[in-house]
Structures are given as structure tokens and as C-alpha cells.
Amino acid sequence: MQRANCFVIAVLIAASQFCAPARPVFAQPAGPEETKAIEAELAQLRAAMDGVKQNPNAEIYLPDIAVYAKATDWILRHNEFYKPDYVKQTRNVLKTGMERTARILLAKGAPDWNTAHGKKILGYQSAIDDSFQPYALTLPDAFGKEPERRWPLHIVLHGRGATLNEVSFIHAHDGKPAAPGAGWIQLDVFGRTNNAYRYAGEADVFEALADVKRRYRIDDRRIVLHGFSMGGAGSWHLGLHYPALWCSVGPGAGFVDFYKYQKVAEPLPFYQDKALSIYNPVDYTLNAFDVPICTYGGEKDEQLVASTEMVERASKLGLEIKLLIGPGVGHAFHPEAQKEFMAFHAERQKTGRPVYPGTRQIKFTTHTLKYNSCDWITIEEMIEPYAETLVAAEADDDGKVLTVKTKNVAVLELGRDLAQKVVIDGDELPLASAAEGLLPGVHYEQAGGHWIALNYNQSLSFPKNIEVHKRHNLQGPIDDAFMQPFVCVRGTGAAWNEAHAAWASWTLERFAAEFDKWLRGKVVVVNDTDVTDEMLLGKNLILFGDPGSNSMLAKVAPRLPLKWTKTAIEVFGEKYEPATHGLSLIYPNPLSPRKYVVINSGHTFHAEDFAKSNAWLFPRLGDIAVQKFEKLEAGGYNETVEKADFFNSYWKLPSGLAPKN
């Protein structure tokens, strides 16, 4: 595969505190001599890493060293020496990186840091952007005494830190002891700094978890998820979107509702308001039925209202969420409450989740196919995207009948092990014997107001998505493309319109800069002439330019729901002038329908949103948008949304908004 060209433009906007008004964080630049010394040591580490790359097991060992080089690179390029001690911390990071490199070069076996007790920094290479990302891993003192033991795991999500970067994360964790008497392995997630574990931050949780499972024997039935502040918001988010993954969830002092948390009185435009349902935990309260939850807030903490709101909503649904309140404290854990909090999770960890299919009853809700599964239920297609979607299912004790009630579900997959037959919304159908009894799951589809079971051949072809419907990881909106491997493609041809080309180029540069600063990775950019079959089949293509400048865009544009000529972009039933208007959209790639193609957009929220609060990190442009752009004298562009919307479940525009023939 041809090596991709990468570029990045540094952005020097710092994050605000999670639960305080936005405020600038001013770096304390390293002096010229200090910077020179750090750069020299980084060069030495990189040279030593070249030797590690010759090791036959380099792919396994290199990330544990590369994260130290990456931490130094990022703090230098973004001038993130927020505190005077960060210079010393950076030198220590480089020292540890060199020590690990020397141990790999000299050792014949596996590195000993994998088995050392206490807390250490490990790393993995992300599939999203090939970046190296750190995480902290703690092995208890009892680790190794029972080699065949499968260990419980605690995943801990940190709060927002205005001065957080890779160096400070490493310093906070590396070499610290395990908690006395801890009976679990602990994974402290970096989460690509401060994003409430959304987008690449969400992917970081699961990529780090996968790397831990690669190294250690983890008991999948005994994984606890908890966090505080931003980590509490992340625990609500991941805990309720993936309820079947955890034996218990512990959100502490994390927001659950955008409008209330940000005190926004006026509704956002509909295409943004709908997108809030992707992440707002209040819309997923029903999923507390499927996982035990203990939430916490300080008595004097404004964020206590998030916990109480979730508890009240759960109670109205007949569910229980345990609430702990720290007497007399603000945004902090009360020591006694923390003991009770950890005892709750220890008890659930001891019990573990039932062995599949031990759960006989599920109540599950979602507003997006991104989060579509719980144990033996998978919502494969929705009737209306972003509408409340429900599945309530219960199997009788003797395994004869599974009763299912649905709302807004078009296609449903059920585990066949639950019962002999299933009754879905009153329609009785076979379950155990459906699809010739050969597949682990059975697909059911609504047709003519009734449910039917897909046969064996239909079930086998279902994942191919021949008719290109919205499915899991192919449901939009635009921002979803950057939770999976992607590559940006810039044009090398002659643009149809120079003003449009300049805006598109700026859009790419802005995305690269913001992703680098706020999501801690370099955006991979290739020329349109260098797109390989491997990229086409394995990555989402993010295309910048117009059909004249970008040959890949020229190939896909005729198969998109729009018309694009040298003089007009026609979409939404209107014609827009390319010299003043830009089109952004996400769509199944006509050249590789299981992947996305995105046109002229990176993330649809920007640096100012990262800076003010994680609550603002939600999609701004739906699936498709036309923006009027105006070049500013000071540089950059002012953008105004002229029209934005979502495609329906068949990737079609709402009636009347398709291009005219």
C-alpha cells in the first residue's frame, strides 16, 4: 500500500473545565534550551524505536513505546506546557520511553512491564487513524498467583481536565501502586482527552478494552464501568447505549440532558435537535432495566440534578437506579459515599452478568441504529430514524414462547435459543426452527403490517444490504464517519469553481487541525490519484473539492441524490451557486456500499465547541446540508446553514426534496 501523505495544522485553543464556564488555559512555554533538549531526546527515542521496528514482534511491543514519543510530539507541537512541571514530566516520559526501548532491544522474551504489579502505561495503534493512543492499566498484587484465572475488570473514565494531555496523563498514572486488596484489573482510559467519550473518544474505550483483552484473561461477565464528572457523563452514555456489556455502571456527577445542562431555552434547529437524541442519556433511561446502575452526586453539586433526574425517570418506568448523595460536598466524592459506591459494584462484579441466554427478559430503547443491540436482541432497521424505538421481550420459563412488542422497528434479529416460537406484536412465528435452524440469530421483517421470518438464504444475504438501507454503522449522520477508519482525499485536477475550491481546501485544513488538537491524531490525507482498492474497501472516504478537481468525487457524484454541474449544485429541489455555497453530506459509498463517502466535511462541530463544553459535541448538519460561505478578511470563512436534513431509512431525501429531473 502506498504510504499516505499526512499533514496537520496546529491549533492552540485550550479546553475549559468540564463543570465551569469556558476560560482560556495559557501555556507556560518551555524555554529555548529546554525545548532544544526535549527535541534532541525525542529524536534519540525515535531513532531507537527504528531498531525496535526490526524486532519480529514489533507490532506487539512498539505501541507501548510509541505512546511516549507521541506524548512528547503533541506537547511540543501544540505548546501544551500548561504548568512549569510539564517540562520535567516530558523529560521523564522520554526517559521511560528510552528505558522500554532498551529493554526490548536487549531482551529475548516478552517485556516485563506486562506482568508487573501496580499501574503502568500501555498503548495500541488505533484503526481509525493509525495513531498511537495510551491507556493506564493496573494489575493487583494478587495478579499472577493463579495463571488461569479470568479477572474482573473496572473501566474508569476520567473527568475533564483543562490541562490534560498525554504527558500529564502518563505522569498521573505511570508507576503508581494498585489499590490495597483490589480484586480486579483496572483500565483507566485516556479517551483522546476531553470529549465525553464520544466519536474517536468512544472508539478509544473499546480499542483500549480490546487491547487489554489481548494481553490479559478478562472475565467478560464481570466488567464494571464507572467515572466522575465528564467520566460520569461518559458512563451514562456508554452504560445505557451498551447495557449488555457491563455487570454494573457507576455514573458520578455527569450531565444527561443538553438543554438543561447548558440552560438553553430555545429549541435548536430540527436537524440539530434530532441529533441530540443520539447521545442524551435521558432518552435511554429504559435501558437501566438491563444493567444495574448506582449514581452519585454531591449534596451541593449543581450536577446532582443529573442523577436525580435519571432516578426519577427510571422510577416512572418502574425501574430502580440507586442514588448516593455526598453530604455537604460539592463536585467531589464524599469518602463514605465512595465506599458504598464501590461496594455496590463489588457485589455486582461478584455476581456477574447471566450466561447467554440467561437473561429471559429485555427492555431496550434507542433512537439510532448506531446503538442497536442488547444481548440477544438486535434492531437491524428502523422505520423512522431518530424516533423513539422500543423492543420489550420476555421468554417463558419452559422455553416455549418468546413474546416481543416493538415500536418503530422494521427489521429485528432474535437469538434462536430463547424459545420454540415467538409472538411479535401479535404475529406468531417459528423461532428455534426458523431459517432451517442453522443460524444463531433469526431475522424478522415487517411486511404489509405483519411480521415475517426471513428464510435461510434471505438471512445469509441480509448483511450484504443489497438495497442499501440504513443499518448499524451505516446510518449517519456526517460525524459518524469518523468513528471508523477513514482517509481524506484531496483533488489534484482543475476545479470547476476556484471560490468553491478555496472553501473546500480550508474545510479540510480546519478538520485536520481540529482533529489533531482535540482528538489527538493526524488526519491521513491522500491525493485522489492515490486512492487504493484497500482504502476503498476498508475505509470511509472523505472527499474534498468538486467533480472537476477530485476524480473520486466525479465517480460517485452521479450516483448521489443530487446534481452537480459547473454552474450549479442542485439538491433539496433548489439550485445553489458553487461560488457561494458548499454541499456537505454522508452517504453509502457507491463504489463500496458498506462504507461511507463524505463530501466536504470533517466533524460538524468545531474548536469553539470543544472549548466551551463537551455537551456541545453533537452533529450540526444532519446527513446532508448546504452552507453559504463568505470569505473573511482576517482569514477563514463564515458559514451559514441554508438547508439541512436527514435521509430516511432508505437513504432517500424527504418527499419533494429530491433533485429535479
Image: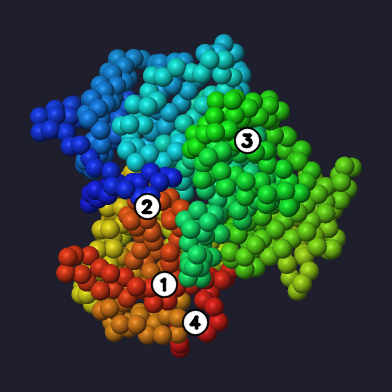
- Label number found at residue 657: 4
Q: Earlier in the sequence, mark 3 or mark 1?
A: 3
Q: CA distance from mark 2 to mark 1?
A: 24 Å
Residue 522 % position (x, y): 30, 47
- Which residue is located at x 52 percent, y 45 percent? 303
Vertical order, 350 against 247 (above or below) = above
The picture places residue 494, in percent across and down from the top left corner, at 21, 72
Residue contact at pointers 3 and 4, CB within 8 angstroms: no
Asked whether the residues under the numbered discs 2 and 4 touch, taking CB atoms below 8 Å apart as contact, a structural biologist would say no
Residue underneath mark 1: 625
Choose mark 3 or mark 1, whichever is in front: 3
Disc 3 to disc 1, how far (Cα)? 44 Å
Q: Residues within 10 Å of mark 4 (few under 14, many from 20)?
A: some
Query: Could you tell which of marks 2 and 4 lies nearer the N-terminus?
Result: 2
Q: Secondary structure at mark 3?
A: strand
If the image is split into quadrants, where does the C terminus sit? bottom left
As rendered, which of 58 and 587 lies closer to the eye? Answer: 587
Q: Are marks 3 and 1 in contact (CB under 8 Å)?
A: no
Which of marks 1 and 4 precedes in the sequence?
A: 1
Q: How far is disc 4 from disc 1 in space, using C-alphas?
A: 12 Å
Vertical placement of 176 versus 499: above or below? above
- Count of all numbered marks drawn on residues in the image: 4
Residue furthest to the left: 33
Name the residue carrying label 3: 324
- The residue under label 2 is 612
